[in-house]
Image: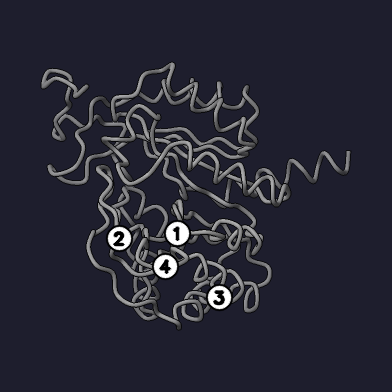
């Protein structure tokens, strides 16, 4: 049921806790120049991420492969929709060169949906992982993939490349899928995460949701339980921000204390790494969370 006009929040009413830090000129411009030089796309720019200043100032950028045009039109997403260009066979090489040039210890690779390709773009993910491992073996690799719906063998192909972290976002609770993710299916996404963990238990799995789309607290908690039942290790929870007036409206802005409460609940449910805050995004501080987990595991092993 659509929210009433009284419950929808106008963009001008965005609260103070959603103000992102302005970028520092030097490192931010260096990152931009390197991305341009290697002819790469980033989700930081294409999705209008509010954390681009903080991340690019640290020379962190989330690389977006398979072009910049998506074959789907999700109601929350700012990435362009239409007919994508042909697959670029040199993209994995350029990506690996950029990872090396940036000196990344941890890289996050995502993509648009490519329903036009027989494998949904899974093979390009594999080639990118292989090239990065070849030129920068010390870099840990986190991927954030589409659902590869109706593409036989695609999930298994990418899982078998053994990224260090396999992320696939649910984005919202199942009741809102028809309005928010009309081209996706909640239980298909859950099953994707479950299949990755079944096939390669050593690969960490990760997912994320947004608040402010009209979900209820009980639905958020149930979604957490669904993710834990699928063996998901890492969870991110952030605030939905409406990219343009054409996108799904913001129903409410959740205060920081609500995110803190969800983080406490998520850790109690068994998630190994949890990031929950108004400005949390899938790849924001991804390296920090992964490093924290490795330190914890190392200390437990030594103990």
Q: Nearer the viewer, mark 4 or mark 3?
A: 4
Mark 3 Cα-neighbour bin, 10 Å: few <14, some 14–19, many ≥20: some
Label 3's element? helix
Question: Quarter of the image holding residue 84?
Answer: bottom left
Where residue 265 appears, as percent x and y from the top left, is 55, 21
Question: Quarter of the image holding residue 47?
Answer: bottom left
Label 2's element? strand
Vertical position of residue 228 compared to residue 136: above or below: above
Tag 2 or tag 4, which sits nearer the N-term? 4
Vertical position of residue 3 compared to residue 197: above or below: above
Which residue is disc 2 drawn over? 70
- Assign the N terminus to one quadrant of the image: top left
Q: Nearer the viewer, mark 4 or mark 2?
A: 2
Colour scheme shown: one colour
- Assign the C terminus to one quadrant of the image: top right
Tag 4 or tag 1, which sits nearer the N-term? 4
Which residue is disc 4 drawn over? 65
Q: Mark 4 near mark 3, Cβ–Cβ under 8 Å?
A: no
Q: Mark 1 near mark 4, Cβ–Cβ under 8 Å?
A: yes
Could you tell me which residue is drawn at 55 percent across and 75 percent down?
Answer: 100
């Amino acid at each position: 049921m659509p929210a009433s006009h009284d419950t929808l929040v106008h963009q001008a009413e965005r609260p103070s806790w959603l103000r992102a830090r302005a970028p520092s000129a030097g490192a931010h411009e260096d990152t931009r120049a390197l991305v341009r030089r290697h002819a790469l796309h980033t989700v930081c720019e294409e999705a209008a991420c509010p954390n681009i200043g903080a991340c690019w100032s640290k020379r962190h950028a989330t690389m977006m492969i398979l072009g910049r045009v998506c074959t789907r039109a999700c109601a929350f997403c700012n990435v362009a929709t239409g007919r994508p260009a042909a697959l670029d066979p040199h993209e994995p090489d350029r990506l690996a060169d950029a990872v090396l040039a940036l000196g990344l210890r941890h890289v996050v690779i995502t993509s648009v949906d490519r329903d036009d390709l027989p494998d949904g773009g899974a093979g390009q993910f594999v080639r990118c992982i292989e090239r990065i491992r070849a030129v920068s073996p010390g870099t840990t690799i986190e991927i954030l993939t589409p659902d590869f719906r109706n593409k036989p063998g695609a999930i298994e192909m990418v899982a078998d490349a053994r990224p260090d972290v396999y992320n696939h976002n649910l984005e919202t609770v199942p009741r809102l899928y028809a309005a928010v993710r009309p081209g996706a299916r909640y239980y298909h996404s859950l099953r994707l995460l479950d299949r990755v963990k079944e096939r390669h238990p050593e690969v960490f799995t990760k997912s994320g949701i947004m608040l402010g789309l009209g979900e209820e607290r009980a639905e958020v908690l149930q979604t957490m339980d669904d993710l834990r039942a699928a063996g998901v290790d890492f969870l991110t929870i952030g605030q939905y921000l409406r990219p343009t007036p054409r996108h799904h409206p913001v129903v409410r802005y959740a205060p920081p204390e609500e995110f803190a409460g969800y983080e406490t609940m998520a850790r109690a449910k068994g998630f190994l790494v949890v990031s929950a805050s108004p400005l949390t995004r899938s790849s924001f501080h991804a390296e920090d969370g992964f490093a924290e987990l490795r330190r914890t595991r190392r200390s437990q092993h030594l103990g």
